Image (cartoon, coloured by chain):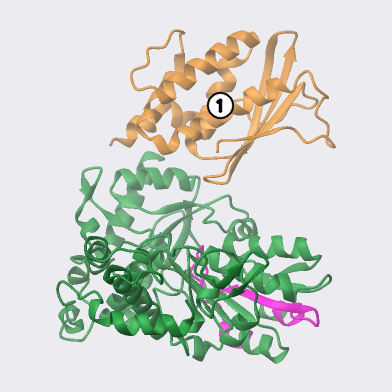
């Protein structure tokens, strides 16, 4: 078992210097994800223009895998149409869980997450941000999140 | 069957009781010339410790979550399953009588181990959690009124928080908690103030599972009793590491789990003072806890069976009895001395790791070292140590209020059992070096 497969340079880099870290205020959509296994939480805020995801910010605390995954996700989905975001989500999910999966889409940096497959206890760390993104997008047609409005929460359990 | 009947079956069945396949090694076989435990001889009793983890010899430092089982326990449960298994307290056939005798003999072993007055005070449960729920529901359902208070501490495992929260919510009572100090000890000044005229129960850990702190239970029990408040001790994290004598402690309830003291999972014990247990209503209804059943109403069996509805974990109880006998053979004072040595060595070695912060530095600790590494999440520490063959626990340890107090989501925790040695600590420290390399 080689932890270098898990902690690749690109993952360590995104953990050290997370991209798109912070909060959008106001935001068009928001959600909070929890990983009860380790007590981590991840908060996402989105700016959505029609069918296009214009901006993503995340904050919270998490392990290197969860921070790097959220950081790389934020780069990968910015500027994409919502159907493309969903297609990417399906690809990443397959990448994390299916041993011999051949990606149907160019995944770029996200391919670095393939090492997570060998560490089943850590798949939830990498997928938490994607589940949270789905939950956030699902809220965009409902009331805008405000300080008095609790955003939806998702859990990896 | 009533207690008298059961005692009779017990006596008749003595001849069928399980004879050990081989005598347990004498206690002296485990000692060096100075009378101290030789870890290598103890380790040899635990088959799982011979396996590898990711191609490296296993270093098991997660006994606070669940300890491993020695051959004496594995043999006792296998022997029961292959020679004696049947339901207890019912059959006239030899197997049932043998199973009953072995099950009730395990209860007597538990009684002796914690020095209870009588086996009527020893109730088998699924574990500590079920034992605490039993008290909260059965004792609390009758004794707690609106406006009353239950006092716990900020060090508790969730299993000694949530049952009381549920009870308080149902009865309109208040749950209060004794706060912590930065070293992970209790603020006793605050305790004195929180123990008030409406306090009806003091429920607290004997030892903190997250930090290893030994709580000052002697003075807390005395203060509670001075006000007529009963005390429940969650002994899950204490039972394997120091002598527990419920009469000397003078506690009213003591709960512990088998799997924290080298026995299988799914078996635990509630000790309760007989007068309190006798006054409490049954908790779960079903077989074994009844004397008579009619559609119009039922009558209850005597203690301890009044609180043991349904077919019990017979094999688990027999395994627990064997585990306690194993611990007695090694000697509880010798185990405590061995683990204190490990704690001192581990604390010193970890303090020398750059960026490492010990969480919980109480003067009186057993068995646990909790820590963080600057800039590295405990979950990542756990994964890299695992790849190095070292099993530790990472997370909130089912004690989220403790984590909240320290402003942390999680810690890494190494915990010790009697089979650990200084080499295990060396491997832990080397593994932490590898963690720092990866995140350099």
Q: At x 66% / y 26%, what residue is drawn?
A: A135
Instruction: Tell me if residue B393 comes above or below residue B342 in the rendering.
Output: above
Percent coordinates x, y for residue B211 in the rendering: 51, 65
The magenta span reads B191-220
Nearer to the camera, B20 or B312: B312
Q: At x 56% / y 86%, what residue is drawn?
A: B274
Which chain contains the residue that carries disc 1?
A: A
Residue B155 visible to an observer of this rendering: no
Residue B177 vs residue B408: left or right?
A: right
Secondary structure under tag 1 reads helix
Nearer to the camera, B403 or B6: B6
Percent coordinates x, y for residue B326 in the rendering: 27, 75
Chain B palette colour: green
Residue denoted by label 1: A71
Percent coordinates x, y for residue A82 in the rendering: 65, 11
Instruction: Tell me if residue A57 comes above or below residue B249 in the rendering.
Output: above
**Quarter-of-image position of residue B49:** bottom left
Any magenta on residue B199? yes
């Amino acid at each position: 078992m080689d932890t270098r497969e898990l902690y690749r340079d690109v993952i360590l880099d995104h953990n050290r210097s997370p991209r798109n870290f912070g909060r959008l205020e106001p935001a068009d959509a928001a959600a909070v994800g929890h990983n009860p296994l380790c007590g981590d939480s991840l908060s996402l805020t989105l700016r959505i223009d029609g069918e296009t995801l214009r901006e993503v910010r995340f904050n919270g605390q998490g392990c290197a895998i969860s921070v790097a995954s959220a950081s790389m996700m934020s780069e990968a989905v910015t500027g994409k149409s919502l159907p493309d975001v969903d297609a990417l989500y399906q690809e990443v999910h397959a990448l994390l869980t299916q041993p011999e999966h051949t990606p149907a889409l160019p995944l770029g940096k996200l391919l670095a997450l393939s090492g997570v497959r060998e560490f089943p206890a850590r798949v939830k760390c990498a997928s938490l941000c994607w589940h949270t993104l789905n939950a956030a997008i699902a809220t965009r047609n409902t009331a805008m999140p405000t300080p008095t409005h609790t955003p939806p929460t998702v859990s990896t359990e | 069957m009533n207690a008298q009947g059961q005692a009779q079956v017990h006596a008749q069945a003595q001849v069928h009781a399980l004879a050990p396949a081989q005598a347990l090694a004498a206690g002296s076989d485990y000692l060096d010339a100075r009378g101290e435990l030789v870890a290598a001889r103890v380790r040899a009793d635990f088959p799982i410790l011979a396996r590898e983890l990711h191609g490296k010899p296993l270093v098991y430092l997660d006994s606070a979550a669940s300890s491993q089982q020695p051959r004496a326990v594995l043999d006792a449960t296998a022997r029961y399953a292959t020679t004696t298994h049947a339901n207890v307290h019912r059959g006239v056939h030899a197997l049932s009588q043998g199973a009953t005798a072995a099950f009730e003999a395990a209860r007597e072993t538990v009684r002796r181990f914690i020095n209870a007055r009588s086996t009527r005070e020893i109730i088998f449960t699924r574990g500590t959690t079920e034992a605490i729920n039993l008290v909260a529901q059965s004792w609390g359902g009758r004794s707690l009124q609106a406006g009353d208070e239950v006092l716990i501490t900020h060090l508790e495992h969730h299993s000694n928080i949530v049952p009381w929260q549920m009870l308080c919510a149902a009865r309109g009572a208040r749950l209060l908690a004794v706060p912590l100090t930065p070293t992970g000890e209790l603020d006793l000044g605050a305790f004195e103030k929180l123990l008030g005229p409406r306090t009806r129960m003091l429920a607290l850990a004997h030892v903190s599972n997250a930090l290893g702190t030994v709580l000052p239970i002697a003075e807390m029990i005395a203060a509670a009793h001075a006000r007529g408040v009963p005390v429940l001790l969650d002994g899950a994290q204490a039972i394997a590491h120091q002598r527990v004598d419920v009469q000397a402690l003078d506690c009213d309830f003591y709960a512990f789990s088998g799997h924290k003291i080298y026995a299988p999972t799914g078996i635990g014990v509630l000790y309760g003072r007989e007068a309190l247990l006798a006054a409490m209503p049954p908790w779960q209804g079903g077989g074994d806890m009844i004397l008579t059943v009619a559609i119009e109403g039922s009558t209850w069996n005597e203690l301890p069976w009044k609180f043991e509805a349904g077919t019990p974990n017979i094999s688990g109880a027999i395994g627990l009895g064997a585990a306690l006998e194993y611990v007695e053979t090694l000697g509880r004072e010798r185990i405590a001395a061995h683990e204190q040595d490990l704690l001192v060595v581990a604390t010193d070695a970890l303090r020398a790791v750059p960026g490492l912060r010990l969480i919980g530095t109480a003067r009186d600790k057993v068995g646990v070292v909790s820590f963080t590494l600057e800039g590295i999440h405990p979950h990542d520490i756990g994964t890299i140590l695992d790849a190095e063959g070292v099993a530790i626990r990472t997370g909130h340890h089912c004690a989220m209020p403790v984590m909240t107090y320290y402003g942390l989501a999680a810690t890494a925790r190494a915990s010790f059992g009697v089979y650990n040695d200084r080499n295990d600590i060396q491997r832990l420290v080397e593994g932490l070096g590898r963690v720092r390399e990866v995140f350099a």
